[in-house]
Amino acid sequence: MDDLTEPLAESAPQGFGPLIAPMSDVQRPLRQQIFERVRASGAISRAQVAKDLGISPASVTTLTSDLIEAGFLTEVAAPRDGQDGSRGRPPVALGVRADAFAVCGIKLSDREHGVVILDFAGRELAATCAPAAGTETLDETLSTLDRLIEDVCSRAGIDRRDLSALGVGLPGFVDAPSGRVVWSPLLPERDVALAAAAEARLGLPVAIDNDANLVALAELWFGVGRRIADFAVVTIEHGVGMGLVLNHRLYRGARGLGMELGHTKVQLDGALCRCGQRGCLEAYVADYALAREAAVALGRIGQPALPLSQLLGTLHARAKDGDAAARSIFHRAGRFLAVGLANVVNLFDPELVILAGERMRYDFLYADDTLSEMNRLILETGRTAPRIEVHAWGDQLWGYGAAALALSTVTERHLGAAREEPA
Amino acid sequence: MDDLTEPLAESAPQGFGPLIAPMSDVQRPLRQQIFERVRASGAISRAQVAKDLGISPASVTTLTSDLIEAGFLTEVAAPRDGQDGSRGRPPVALGVRADAFAVCGIKLSDREHGVVILDFAGRELAATCAPAAGTETLDETLSTLDRLIEDVCSRAGIDRRDLSALGVGLPGFVDAPSGRVVWSPLLPERDVALAAAAEARLGLPVAIDNDANLVALAELWFGVGRRIADFAVVTIEHGVGMGLVLNHRLYRGARGLGMELGHTKVQLDGALCRCGQRGCLEAYVADYALAREAAVALGRIGQPALPLSQLLGTLHARAKDGDAAARSIFHRAGRFLAVGLANVVNLFDPELVILAGERMRYDFLYADDTLSEMNRLILETGRTAPRIEVHAWGDQLWGYGAAALALSTVTERHLGAAREEPA
């Protein structure tokens, strides 16, 4: 593997520098905005880009020429809308040049790692998953990443030096701008410079982020982000996470470690959270919170502990059968979830909140009861309440989110660093 | 007053259109950024502007020429730092042209209205205050605004047609982008198009916003905003409010009605809030929340109600004297305030949180106990906790904040609407 530390192709230079811009910099150059507009729409005419961004057609022509020359965009046939009789020269639109870059996304988890390679248009070139070993040291984690990349590259039939960036997602507190893992259940060490260590070991630019931000990035690149500029994502798994997209860009808080909705307090001196504090939202909503009361509801006090998924599966089945105690556990968790969602709405006033998860119990947590409770807890403004959508992406989502992180990284690096200059 | 509906000077054209850009548009043209950089610094060289914004000196020269020609900036003598021996030609810096615009700010309240006229450099030209009549109809409110403007203009010795904009602040739920008051204790009607009605009546552009956003704007224009790009403001008065500045700009939530910290829920089925819901933060922290328990602590159950300020004054004096019941009221409110502040920190991860208010009781609420409690409730990231500053601005603050809203309006209107175009 020594050859991997050789100088890389131009698209992945050594000495990568900060991959994620400071969070206060929500400013983006026009050419980056043009690129993002094209990416979001799939295929779009120059005239429409000019209209959407409120800039002159001449400016769009100049800037898109640069983007085409640089290999980011390409001309494609415009989708016919059938109204022009399909006569004459086909109209020309702009699209993202799919083969401009390839990136890898890896979602590390304590159950199973998900790995995907996407091209610049977001098309999957290869995907795989591998069983996880639980907590691993930094060195073991780097070996795992190395092995996963080797595997997925061979499936895609590409050399890993063809990758322009790697995005890694993992649970815990991740300082994305600095590339440090403050704490993760997957690492025994605290405050680990994971991105820098992975770059040194793997020889390509690496960006890291936490689970909830990955979901928000996946939605931003491949989901609702194609039509909505601002939205919130709330994830419920082992913990409760949140991602916020502002003006087509992920917002991580002023210093990069915000959006910890799961650790906002909903009860003074309340239930004990795995973070060590009391009254956190996730101490009422996350799977371990449900499991705490399950033994009582299932009449298993003092009996050997069941695995978490089995315990919750049994609890869920009992609730479905109408068992009052089992139902009350989900009902209470749903009410606290409603509090958390209402707080998100009262603070961020989003048009859309996406609830993302994959677990069977969500049909209880996301029940009409919960949404009605949320509507009772948000400000009465006379306006329509925000839409709540449940997006039950599978495991694949996480890998795509990690790849979207890598795509964001590549885009920011190449388009976001310099500012366009007038005249 | 009919003459006020005559066509106005160019700086206040009829048909004003939306004064506040949609909240998702955190993008600003370069010339607006240059203006804001100059404004924030007082006096700054072109070279420093280029360095701060990461753009070429040539671009700064071009864009500042435009800004000087348009009357926004002017050349001033650079402050000497004493290191260059003060020889030779004095270096030239840029400053805001103070007389470019004059704006009026009015803070409506149920106690006293505050009014101020500022020039474009933020210098006070006149200020006054007037007793408030409590709840007034829309029509009465418009007459009040008209009278206050007439008064303060005559104090400043200017014609009201010289005003470029009016900023109005009031308590309640204010939809700033649309200029509508969803609900305010000062208006008997709901969903009032106050900004449009005031524009029609007063003949100048009007922007409106709520109390907490005024404080954030005052800090942005005249306070910490001169050195920090991102910060949060929490206000505690009759209610609990919040303002958030992101990248030198006020953030009001995706649809304009966010940041309602006072109505985030900190207790399921908790104390009754004046908004009609239960468990809101302000139902534990605001003055009416303290007053609810004061009768018990003061042994006044069943006795005639004291005025709110007298009741709280007595309670505060008792607490100072060591009365356990009185102290426990402030202690409990302080703990809930700590929960609210910790939630702000866990979500927004700000470098700085400003607590703003003017009431005597704050020395209890802001005591070391409260800040210690907050520090116990924020995520353990190994980093320094955000700074908490108490800014006990007087009543004057509110008028300045309203004037800052007007200044923001003028700046956005003249500099933010068009985008600069390359080449």
Image (cartoon, coloured by chain):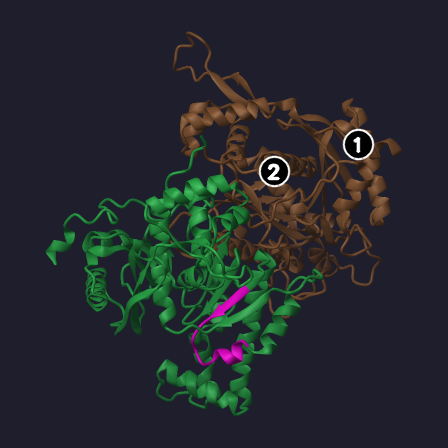
Chain colours: A green, B brown
- Residue B103 image point, x, y percent: 70, 31
Q: Residue furthest front?
A: A88
Foreground residue among B238 and A10: A10
Mark number displayed over residue B412: 2
Query: Chain letter of disc 2?
Result: B
Locate residue B101: give its quadrant: top right
Foreground residue among A115 and B222: A115
Q: Is residue A225 magenta?
A: no
Task: Inspect this view and state whether residue A268 appears.
Answer: no
A170 displayed left or right of B93: left
Q: Residues within 10 Å of mark 2 (few under 14, many from 20)?
A: some
- Residue A8 image point, x, y percent: 19, 49
Residue plotted at (44% across, 85% down): A295
Q: What stretch is highlighted in magenta?
A: A353-366
B142 displayed left or right of A243: right
Q: Residue furthest left?
A: A2
Mark number displayed over residue A406: none
The residue tagged with tag 2: helix, strand or loop? helix
Mark number displayed over residue B7: 1
Foreground residue among A327 and B311: A327
- Residue A93 image point, x, y percent: 44, 53
The amino acid type, in three-letter code, at marker 2 is Glu
Q: Which residue lies furthest to the bottom in this view?
A: A321
- Distance, label 1 to label 2, CA atoms, is 22 Å
Query: Chain letter of disc 1?
Result: B
Locate residue B250: give its quadrant: top right
